[in-house]
Amino acid sequence: MTTAQRDSLVWKLAGLLRESGDVVLSGCSTLSLLTPTLQQLNHVFELHLGPWGPGQTGFVALPSHPADSPVILQLQFLFDVLQKTLSLKVLGVGKGQDVQGAQENDGRWG
């Protein structure tokens, strides 16, 4: 995934959660993500917001420092929301199907 694609994913998901994240955070709705999307988010979190300590579990408070870019601000928002999400459904991608195909065929945003 290119940097532009990653940034687009971050902006789209952050926008979606800013718009309707309250129903996810309240537990009234389940957030569904495709496995590759969650993997990309984890990679981007570790790359820009990490590193994490070995075996670190539980809620991770990010240091309060100014963000270098608008994308980092979006990542910080996503990181916080995903940690507080009560219900997360991870959807696998079918064999031979890429993320875009899964989004189109399944009707879900990944």
Image: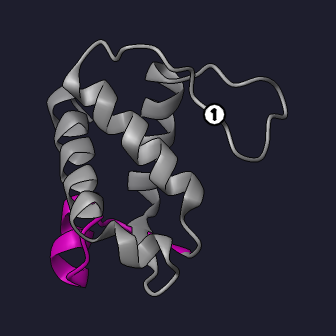
Can residue 81 be seen here? The reply is: yes
Q: Look at the image and say whether residue 28 sits in the magenta stretch.
A: no
Image quarter where the N terminus lies is top left
For mark 1, does the 10 Å Cα neighbourhood hold few (<14), some (14 to 19), or many (20 or more) residues? few
In the rendered view, would you say 65 is above or below 41? above
Residue 42 x %, y %: 51, 40
Three-letter amino acid code at the position of disc 1: Ala
Residue sitting at the far right: 55
Secondary structure of the residue carrying tag 1 is loop
61 sits to left or right of 80: right
In the drawing, does residue 23 fall left or right of residue 9? Answer: right
Picture coordinates of residue 16 (x, y %)? 22, 62
Residue drawn at x 54%, y 65% is 85
Residue 91 visible in the displayed image: no
Q: Is residue 35 above or below residue 68?
A: below
Report x, y in % for residue 5.
18, 38
Q: Magenta part of the protein: which range?
A: 88-110
Q: Tell me what residue is drawn at x 20 percent, y 82 percent.
A: 107
Residue 106 sits in which quadrant?
bottom left
Q: Is residue 89 left or right of residue 58?
A: left
Q: Is residue 47 above or below residue 97?
A: above
Tell me: residue 13, above or below residue 49: below
Is residue 90 on the magenta stretch?
A: yes
In the drawing, does residue 28 fall left or right of residue 103? Answer: right
Name the residue at 32% across, 26% down.
72
For disc 1, the marked residue is 61
